[in-house]
Image: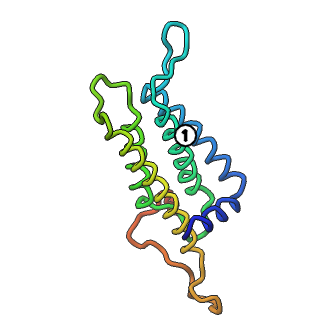
């Protein structure tokens, strides 16, 4: 799936998915800013201890995380989220936090490594979003437009569902 197709698909999202994406993005910005120590309260005023690119990375990453999380809700039939979908977004979030962390006395990442890890985290989150949306698209797409039955899209057979349905008795 290309970027133009992804943007078209995002525009077609229902309002509930968009609201989830916005809410998660705001929560992630607040969690990263407070957790990483890029905004603090010193001497009666708010201080901004982070770099300009750090705030840009936090906002961009938060938007991508919000879109990824929203993609797990109201998924079309056959495109249910799986545990395999979580691997790369979780790694992206961890990388995003490490690249913006200012709270620790001796940061794990220092110098020019921070911006490199930040760009890698954004690229990883963008790729994870594209893969999630492409997986949804493949799951609901017919392989042969002339086929009437039995030619549904592909399904992941190696992953467990993220939200398994409870067995009914």
Q: Quadrant of residue 49?
A: top left
Name the residue rendered at 52%, 48% in the picture: 65
Does residue 44 lie above or below 109 as drawn? above
Does residue 19 lie above or below 104 as drawn? below
Is there any visible trace of residue 169 in the rendered image? Answer: no
Does residue 157 lie above or below 110 as drawn? below
Name the residue rendered at 44%, 52% in the picture: 89
For the residue pair 19 and 155, the one nearer the viewer reads as 19
Q: Residue furthest top?
A: 43
- Tell me the residue that label 1 is attached to: 59
Colour mode of the rendering? rainbow
* Residue 127 placement (x, y as % from top left): 46, 59
Secondary structure category for the residue under label 1? helix
Q: Is residue 4 left or right of residue 42?
A: right
For the residue pair 103 and 85, the one nearer the viewer reads as 103
* Residue 44 placement (x, y as % from top left): 54, 8
Name the residue rendered at 63%, 59% in the picture: 74
* Residue 36 placement (x, y as % from top left): 42, 29
Badge 1: how crowded within 10 Å, few (<14), some, or many (20+)? Answer: some
């Amino acid at each position: 799936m290309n970027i133009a197709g992804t943007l078209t698909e995002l525009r077609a999202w229902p309002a509930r998915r968009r609201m989830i994406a916005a809410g998660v993005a705001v929560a992630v910005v607040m969690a990263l800013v407070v957790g990483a120590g890029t905004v603090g309260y010193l001497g009666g005023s708010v201080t901004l201890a982070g770099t300009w690119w750090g705030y840009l990375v936090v906002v961009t990453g938060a938007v991508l995380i919000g879109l990824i999380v929203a993609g797990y809700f109201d998924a079309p039939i056959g495109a249910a989220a799986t545990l395999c979908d979580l691997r790369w977004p979780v790694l992206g979030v961890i990388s995003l936090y490490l690249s913006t962390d200012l709270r620790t006395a001796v940061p794990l990442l220092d110098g020019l490594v921070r911006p490199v890890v930040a760009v890698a985290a954004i690229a990883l989150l963008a790729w994870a979003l594209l893969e999630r949306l492409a997986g949804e698209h493949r799951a609901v797409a017919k392989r042969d437009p002339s086929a009437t039955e039995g030619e549904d899209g592909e399904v992941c057979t190696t992953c467990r569902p993220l939200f398994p349905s409870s067995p009914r008795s």
